[in-house]
Image (spheres, rainbow, N blue to C red):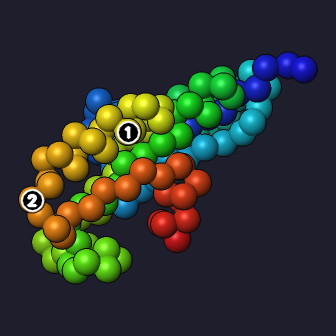
């Protein structure tokens, strides 16, 4: 069976292209054969050439699977953890490998341990997409 590829990316928070912009989710297209992945990538980058914050990458299927973890959360309005507190934003960090996501989660929760209104969770790209709906 031929190797498969995904085109992943979207709008990022800054030009390090490591954190998806608030309110956005990582886009994932595929799986494709290598040639089709490059065609998809060209089409997407052509449509977004005027936005310096949008970037897409081609990833082998095995690489795309390991980079599908996010750390999400922030300061909430109450302990139901369903609505972000006024003046704050829903934070999204990633995509990461599971290990990197867990380390990021530990760092964030360690900094906010004294604030009962702050909560961070680990989720997959699919779960993040469901939250955005």
- Residue contact at pointers 2 and 1, CB within 8 angstroms: no
Quarter assignment of residue 33:
top right
Quarter assignment of residue 42:
top right
Q: Residue 114's mark? A: 2
Within-10-Å neighbours for mark 1: few <14, some 14–19, many 20+ = some
Which residue lies most toward the left here?
Answer: 114
Instruction: Out of 38 and 49, give the one closest to the viewer.
Output: 38
- Name the quarter where the N terminus is drawn: top right
**Residue 115: x percent and y percent?**
12, 63
Tag 1, which secondary structure? helix
Instruction: Out of 124 and 13, give the one closest to the viewer.
Output: 124
**Residue 127: x percent and y percent?**
54, 58
Image height of 50 relative to 66, above or below: below
Within-10-Å neighbours for mark 2: few <14, some 14–19, many 20+ = few
Q: CA distance from mark 2 to mark 1?
A: 20 Å
Q: Residue 102's mark? A: 1
Quarter assignment of residue 91:
bottom left
Q: Which residue sits at x=16%, y=68%?
A: 116
**Residue 62: x percent and y percent?**
66, 25
Which numbered disc, 2 or 1, marks the residue that appears first in the sequence? 1
| Left or right: residue 93 compared with residue 110 | right
Q: Which residue sits at x=85%, y=19%?
A: 2
Instruction: Out of 1 and 32, give the one closest to the viewer.
Output: 1
Q: Residue 36's mark? A: none
Q: Which residue sits at x=47%, y=32%?
A: 97
Image height of 72 relative to 133, above or below: above
């Amino acid at each position: 069976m031929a190797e498969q590829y995904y085109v992943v990316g979207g709008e990022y928070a800054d030009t390090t292209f490591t954190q998806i912009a608030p309110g956005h989710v990582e886009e994932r297209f595929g799986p494709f054969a290598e040639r089709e992945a490059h065609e998809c990538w060209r089409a997407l980058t052509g449509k977004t050439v005027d936005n310096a914050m949008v970037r897409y990458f081609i990833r082998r299927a095995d690489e795309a699977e390991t980079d599908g973890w996010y750390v999400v959360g922030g300061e909430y309005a109450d302990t139901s953890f369903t609505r972000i507190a006024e003046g704050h934003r829903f934070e999204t960090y990633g995509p990461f490998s599971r290990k990197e996501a867990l380390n990021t989660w530990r760092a964030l929760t360690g900094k906010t341990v004294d604030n009962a209104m702050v909560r961070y969770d680990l989720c997959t790209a699919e779960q993040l997409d469901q939250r955005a709906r």
